[in-house]
Image: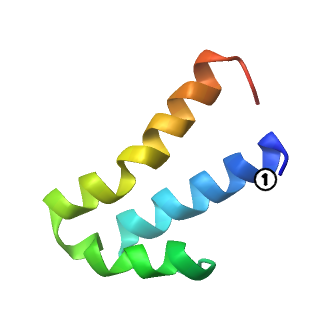
Amino acid sequence: MSVAVVRERLVLFLAAMARGSGSLAGDEEALLVVAGNPVRSVCATLAWRALAGALDDAGLT
């Protein structure tokens, strides 16, 4: 999977979590269940935000 595809999925997932809805693939869609609970939402997005930070730190776009 290319970095561009990973970035696109990151953006789509985090936007869907912020809205509480969206059309995501498979397991990503299942995580939307927690979007209404702020504490669980933070936990559900932690790995995604860490991945985004790692890509940024590595200078990968």
Q: Is residue 55 above or below residue 49?
A: above
Q: How many marks?
A: 1
Indicate the quadrant where residue 59 lies: top right
Residue 23 showing in the rendered view = no
Q: Is residue 49 left or right of residue 46?
A: right
Residue 44 showing in the rendered view = yes
The residue type indicated by label 1 comes to Val
Residue at the (59%, 62%) spot, across then down = 12
Rate crowding at label 1 as few (under 14), some (14 to 19) or many (20 or more) other CA atoms within 10 Å. Answer: few
Q: Is residue 6 above or below residue 57?
A: below
Q: Is residue 17 above or below residue 55?
A: below
Q: Name the quadrant of the C terminus.
A: top right
Residue at the (38%, 71%) spot, across then down = 19
Please name the residue that numbered disc 1 is placed on.
5
x then y, percent, for residue 20: 35, 76
Residue at the (70%, 54%) spot, across then down = 8
Q: Is residue 18 left or right of residue 1?
A: left
Q: Is residue 55 above or below residue 13?
A: above
Protein image colouring:
rainbow
Indicate the quadrant where residue 3 lies: top right
Query: Under tag 1, what secondary structure?
Result: helix
Which residue is the extreme one toward the right? 2
x then y, percent, for residue 34: 27, 74
Residue at the (65%, 58%) spot, across then down = 9
x then y, percent, for residue 2: 85, 46
